[in-house]
Amino acid sequence: MRIVPVLTLIFAVATARVTKTESPKEVLAQINKDSFGNSVLSVLQLQLATGGPVGEIQILLNNIASQLNGDQKKADKVHESDTVAFEKIIADLEQEIAYHESQIVALSNLRDSTTEALEEAEVEVRVVTSDIANNEKSFADESATRQSQHETWVRKDAEHVDQMDAIDEASKIVQHLQAGVAFAQLKSRFEKVQAKLMESKHALFKPLINALTQLASKVDNKSIIKILELLAQIRQQLVASRASLLATEERQAANWEVQSGHLQEEHKRLVERKAFLENSIVQFKVTIQEAVEDLEDQTLFLEDAEDSLAIQQRWAAEQEAQYEAQTFEREQQLEVVERLQEVLTQKLSAASEFLQIREEVF
């Protein structure tokens, strides 16, 4: 059997539409409607008319069926291979999409949390800046207060020294008078001491000043003894007062040393905190900018991966549709071949029967 009748028959059975309830006449009529089918039937009829055995026709149809089955197996193998490859590509793309989605979530969270931290740092740095200003003002105010305290102590201590010197000088003058020295000889010194005591305007010196004034008008031993006792008492009070002022000065100096140390430590801590916050703000801004840029990149990567997935899915759908269409077409072709074989084997057991049907149909 030659190749041309084989191809002719393939096209003929491909275009035929049959059902299992059709009669041989109807099958042959459907095949005969196609020009190739008509030619095949003519060749078959001629072969039978010239004594060609029906077995050769069966061999031809068997070869066609075998070829269709072989083609289907090849198509099934290619389809299976393509399906595996497609599933691998889809799985890779879905994994890539999941990765980009997770990166987008992580970068979004990083951007948001860092933005929140930036806002908190900016608020805190303003508070710390204010605290530094308050600390510096407190240090300046307390330092000025301490300086004023020290200057007051220096002034009062000097006053006490002058007053004690005046008391000592008055004691010497009174002792000289007690020893018999004429007042006239001591008058100049007496008046200087009296003037110095009067300048102090201290209530402590008022009784002494009155007694010295009386002594200037009348020197007597009783008055001298009384004045010496008064001078000793006043000097003792001045020594105690000076010691109290010195103790207060030392206590205030010690307190200021502690307080200034605390203020300086607090100032150092605040300055370091401000520097840390300012550096953090810079880093936060860099992190946010990088996160935004990476987020844009990951979004583009995600879109590309989703586009690739859509393309692969469309391609797979097209390949699947093509495979199903070709499979359906081969199934139809095999069905026609099988029906034709049935007509030849079951209904047309002899060449005369075939020729008779051919003549009846056509």
Image: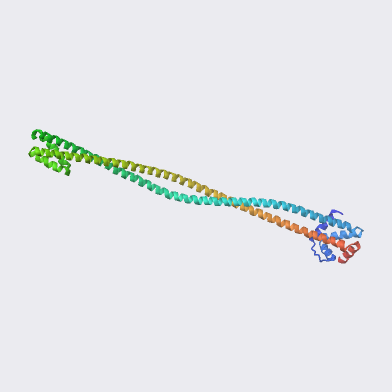
Q: Point out the residue furthest to the left here.
A: 218
Q: Position of residue 178 (x, y in %)?
A: 10, 35
Image-based side of 131 in relation to 186, left or right: right
Quarter-of-image position of residue 266: top left
Q: Nearer the viewer, residue 143 or 85?
A: 143
Residue at x-position 47% and y-position 50%: 117
Residue 124 appears anywhere in the view: yes
* Residue 336 sits above or below residue 256 on the image: below
Quarter of the image with the N terminus in it:
bottom right
Quarter of the picture holding the C terminus? bottom right
Please, which residue is most extreme toward the right here? 51
User: Which quadrant of the view contains residue 274?
Assistant: top left
Q: Residue at 64% of width from left, 53% of height from top?
A: 309
The residue at 59%/50% (across/down) is 99
* Of residues 238 and 323, the one drawn nearer to the viewer in this rendering: 238
Query: Can residue 304 be seen from the camera position used here?
Result: no
249 relative to 10, above or below: above
Q: Residue 252: where, in percent of width, then height?
A: 29, 42
Vertical relation: 170 (above or below) 349: above
Please provide percent x and percent y for residue 125.
42, 48
